[in-house]
Amino acid sequence: MTRPCYLRMEEDVDFRIRFSSLCFITDHVGFRGTIKSSPSDFVVIEIDEQGQLVNKATDDPVYKISKVQPEPNNFAKKTKLDLQNLSFEERSNQEVSTLAGCSGDDQNHQSRSEKEDTVKDGASKGEEGKVDIISSLLDERTNELLNQFAGDIKEKWSSKTELIGPSPEFSLGRILDKNQRAILHSAIRQKFPFLVTVGKNSEIFVKPNLEYKELCHLVSEEEAFDFFKYLDAKKENSRFTFKPDTNKDHRKAVHHFVNKKFGNLVETKSFPGLNYNASNPNVVITVRFREKVHKHRKRSLVECPEGKVIHTAFTLRKENLEMFEAVGFLAIKLGVIPSDFSYAGLKDKKAITYQAMVVRKVTPERLKNIEKEIEKKRMNVFNIHSVEDSLRLGQLKGNHFDIVIRNLKNQINDSANLKERILEAIENVKSKGFVNYYGPQRFGMGRKVHTDQIGLALLKSEMVKAVKLFLTPEDLDNPVNRAKKYFLQTEDAKGTLSLMPELKVRERALLESLHRFGVTEEGCIQAWFSLPHSMRIFYVHAYSSKIWNEAVSYRLATYGSRVVEGDLVCLDEDVNDEHFPNSKVHLVTEEEESANSYAIHQVVLPVLGYNIQYPKNKVGQWYQEILSRDGLQTYRFKVPTLKLNVPGCYRQILKHPHNLSYQLMEEQNTDVKTEGSHIHEAALSLLISFDLDASCYATICLREIMKHDF
C-alpha cells in the first residue's frame, strides 16, 4: 500500500489537511489530469432499484393518471341536486371548482385571473343551470330578507358607516334537518363571504363577518371576497394567492393578519411574482391549508379515493446546479415547499446529472406546464407520471458515470510511457478496488464552514451555533455573502432578509423563522424546522461521514489489508448499500484471523449512530476517543428537538467499479513554444465510464486510479 501524492486546492487549507490522511489500497504510480473542465465532462445518471438508467424514456404516457385519481371532470358530471346526498361543491352553490379536490395543485396554480374565471364560470353555471340551493331551502320571503340584510351590510361598509351597538343579525328560522343546516351554512358563506353563520338550537343566525371587513383595510374587497370563499371551501391541497405587492411592510401586515386570525388552519409564504427583478420587486403571498389540519379533518365527499395525496414522479436533468437550489426553484414554480420533494440521493453540482424525483401535491399536467420556464435554469423534467408514494434516501441501485479527464500527464519525476501508466492504473483498480471514502463534496469542499461542523453542532444541540455556521459568509463579494456578513454582525434577521436574494430559498426560510421567533435557542430550533427533514439530517450524516473517513484511514494504517481479530465483517456477499442489520455483521475471532477466513473487501466499519456495534480492537478504541474528543456519546445520536434519529449503519471499506470501459483521445489543441516557434502538441484525454453502488463517489474512485487529489 502506498501513500498519496497530493496536489491540493489553494483556498481550503483545512480541507487539505483533512484529506491528506486518506490512504490508497493499490500500489501503481498513477497519473495527473483535470476533471470537471466543464459540466458536460462529468455526467451522472442514477440507476434505479430495477437496474435501469433513469435518463431512458419510459413506456408510460407523460400524462399518466393513477387509477386512484379519477378524472376531475367526471366527478363534476356525476353530481346531481339531491339535498340528501349532495357533493361538497353543490352544497357550496357550485361556486368553487371541483377540480382541486382530486387533481392536486394543477387547478390551484392557475394565474389569479384564470382562477377567478373558473370560480365565476362555475358559479354562473350553478345558478343558471340548477335550482339555487339557498332558494330550495328557504321560503321566498326569508330569502328576500336575507339578500336585503346582506345588501344593507355591504352598503354600510361601502359608505364607511360604522355599525353602532351590537352586531346586527338576521335569523333564518329553525331548520330541523341536520344535513340541510350544514348545506345552508356553507352555501351562505360561499355566496356572501362577508357574512358569517351561527347555529343555535337548530336556528341559523346570519351576522357581519368583521374579519372580512378588517382584511378589506389591507387588500382589495375583491381579494377579501375570494379569500374567505377559499377559506370556507377547505379544499384539500388548494392554494390562494393575493395580488402582487411591492410594499414589504404591507406584505408583512397581510402575513400577520392571516396568521393571527387563521394560523391554526393555514400558512402563508412569499414568492417572487412574474417578471420579478430589482426594478419590479413584486412579490405574491400564497396561502395554503396546513397539512396537519387535513390529516385529522373528516374526509369531504370530493376527496380522492382513500384520501391519498397526489404524488408525481419524474426524472430531473440539471446542469451546473446544486441539487437543493434546483429543488428550491422547482418549489417556487410549482407553489409547493422544498420538503414536498423526495429523491434517492444527492448529485454533484458541477456536472450534468439525471436523477429520479417525486413531488407531492402536484399533478403530472402541472409539472409538464413548467418545462419551458425551468429550461432557463438549465433544468429539464421528463418521464412524468403518477406514483403511489415518495422516494426514500438510498432507494437506488447506484449511479452510472461518463467522465472526461483532460490534460493527462505523468506524475512529477515519472518518465514512463503515459498510456501504459493509464492502462496499469485502470486495470489495478478494476481488480483491487478503491478505498470507499465519502467524497469531498459531501463536506462542502472549498467552503469556510464544512457541513460536518454544522452537523456536530446540531448533534450537541448547539442550535444558535449551528445557525451561525450555516450563515457564515465566504470570502467573496456578492449579495449572498454580504447578507450573511450583515447577519453575523447584527443578528438582524429582518434586515438580512431584505439583502438576501429571493432565489436563496434555504437561507430565506431560515431567516424568516429567525425574524418571527428570534435568534435564541428556541428560535433557532424553529428556524431549523423551516428546512426539510432531509436537509437537517444531511448535516448530521456529514459529521458521521467525516468520522468514518478518519476511521478507515486509521484502520488501514494500523492493520493494512489483513483481516484481524475484532474486525467487523459483512456476512452477505450481495450487499451493495449501507443499510443492512446488525445480524449481518460478524465480529472476527482470533481463530478466524489465524485461518484467514475473511478477505479485506468483507470488512465494514460503523457509520456513527445509536444502534451500531464497534470493532473490538484498536479501531474500536479509536472511535471512543474521537467521540470523547468531540463531546459526544452514542446515545446523543438522537436530537428530539429536531426530530432527528440517527441509528447508524455499516459501510464497506473497499468497493469496486462495475462495467468499466475507457477510451484515450488525442486532441490537437495545445500550443507549445519551442525556441521562438510554435508547434502543436497532441493533448491526451481519457473518456472513462463505470457504474458505482449507491453512496460511492466517482471522484474517490478516480483518486485511486490517478493517485491524484482534485
Image (cartoon, rainbow, N blue to C red):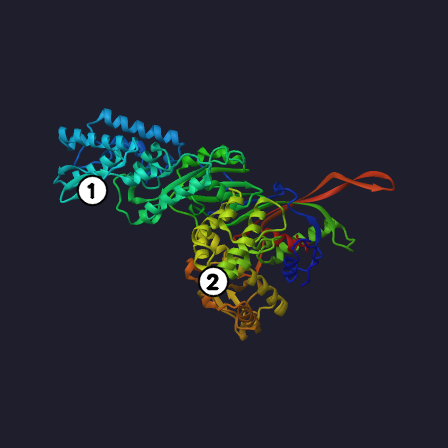
Q: Nearer the viewer, residue 370 or 172?
A: 172
Q: Is residue 650 above or below residue 374?
A: below
Horizontally, residue 199 falls left or right of residue 210, namely left
> Where residue 141 appears, x then y in whole percent?
13, 29
Horizontally, residue 687 falls left or right of residue 695, namely right
> Where residue 249 appears, x then y in whole percent?
44, 41
Q: CA distance from mark 2 to mark 1?
A: 48 Å
| Amino acid, disc 1 | Val
Residue placed furthest toward the bottom:
590
Q: Nearer the viewer, residue 198 or 708?
A: 198
Residue placed furthest toward the top:
128
Q: Is residue 314 above or below residue 590?
A: above
Q: Earlier in the sequence, mark 2 or mark 1?
A: 1
Q: Which residue is tagged 2?
A: 461
Q: Quadrant of the N terminus?
A: bottom right
Q: Nearer the viewer, residue 335 or 268?
A: 268
Q: Which residue is tagged 1?
A: 198
| Amino acid, disc 2 | Ser
Q: On the image, which quarter does residue 189 sit in? A: top left
Binning the other alpha carbons within 10 Å of mark 1 as few (below 14), some (14 to 19) or many (20 upward) gives few
Q: Nearer the viewer, residue 685 or 370?
A: 370
> Where residue 8 appears, x then y in whole percent?
68, 55
Binning the other alpha carbons within 10 Å of mark 2 as few (below 14), some (14 to 19) or many (20 upward) gives some
Mark identifier at residue 47: none
Q: On the image, which quarter does residue 704 sit in? A: bottom right
Q: Secondary structure at mark 2?
A: loop
